[in-house]
Image (cartoon, rainbow, N blue to C red):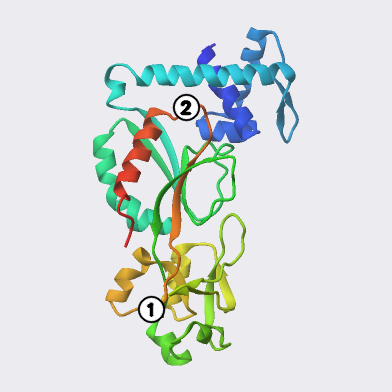
Amino acid sequence: MDRFQAMRVFVRVVQAGSLTQAAQTLQLGRATVTQLLKQLEAHLQVRLLNRTTRRVSLTADGTAYYERALQLLADLEEAEASVGSARSQPRGRLRIDVPSPFAQQVLMPALPDFVARYPGITLEIGASDRAVDVIAQGVDCVIRGGELRDGGLVARRLCGLPLALHASPAYLARCGTPHQPQDLQDPVHQLVGFRGAGSGQVHLPQLSRGGQVLTPAMHCRLSVDDGNACLAAGLAGLGIICLPTYLTAVHVRAGELVPLLPQWELPPMPLHLVFAPNRYVSHRLRVFIDWMTAQLQHGLA
């Protein structure tokens, strides 16, 4: 039995809360995961986990062993990362989840630089705006816009994304152009609502100018949970959209979207990189965080 491999499997099962989920994130067969756990328990001569058909839970011995195993694995990875070529060339798999518009417009165009710098890192990138359980799903980090709700994770603010209201020329020809925030409350106008991954609620745009702050009670018949879908709805003339300007700029230049109420400002959307609160940050995650921070140090227009 490879004791370190068995230890890694045990830690992943605890974090995922499921043998099947752990097997998927480790890219191992479920039978292999089960066998390694049995071998580890036989070696230690204790029961580490209580298993049912739906979930696993730690025994008292398992709780004590988990804390030590987590520290040992962290120390092992730090030791390997601190010597030889690993110091300058981190290796291993890095699992990242980012919003689909961010992946398309920002991350993928910049990624060749990261790949060239760190050829030893294998990337697995998920592109979605949905909530991701960083620990249970074995994801190293996620990038999300908006206010964070999970206080149990570590968050690094990358930048603030400028926001603006836009609508298509066809929509404005049909519904008229709003000239004041109060005009947005007219039933003729519709907001394409964006549902936050954490709350599932649609947030109304907050407008400010010269110390005056207004949140018009806009009407919303359509809401989405994906930035690309929101953009597509705006281009189709389905309503007014409130999105980061890095998504809309090309369409404004093409005349496909028109900025609304440009004399009013919206608070920028905070963009965070979030990861699990372990005692350490792996070398490969650290270099990605530093690289991503450098890419966004001036924000996005």
Local packing at callout 1 (Cα closer than 10 Å; few below 14, some 14-19, many 20+) is few
Q: Is residue 148 above or below residue 268?
A: above
Local packing at callout 2 (Cα closer than 10 Å; few below 14, some 14-19, many 20+) is few
Quarter of the image with the N terminus is top right
Q: Decide which of 208, 199 is in the foreground and name it.
A: 208
- Could you give the CA–CA distance between mark 2 and mark 1, rounded to whole angstroms? 46 Å
x then y, percent, for residue 261: 41, 80
Residue tagged by mark 2?
Answer: 280
Quarter of the view holding residue 286: top left
Q: Nearer the viewer, mark 2 or mark 1?
A: 1
Quarter of the view holding residue 125: top left
Q: Residue at x 70, y 29 (%)?
A: 56
Q: Decide which of 12, 204 is in the foreground and name it.
A: 204
Q: Is residue 104 above or below residue 141?
A: below
Q: Residue at x 56, y 88 (%)?
A: 186
Q: Give the secondary structure at mark 1.
A: loop
Q: Residue at x 56, y 56 (%)?
A: 197
Q: Decide which of 37, 224 is in the foreground and name it.
A: 224
Identify which amino acid the numbered label 2 is placed on: Tyr
Q: Is residue 246 above or below residue 2?
A: below
Quarter of the image with the C terminus is bottom left
**Residue at the far front in the pictured view:** 211
Q: Give the secondary structure at mark 2.
A: loop
x then y, percent, for residue 20: 62, 34
Query: On residue 263, which mark appears?
Result: 1
Identify which amino acid the numbered label 1 is placed on: Gln
Instruction: Classify residue 253 as left or right of residue 60.
Output: left
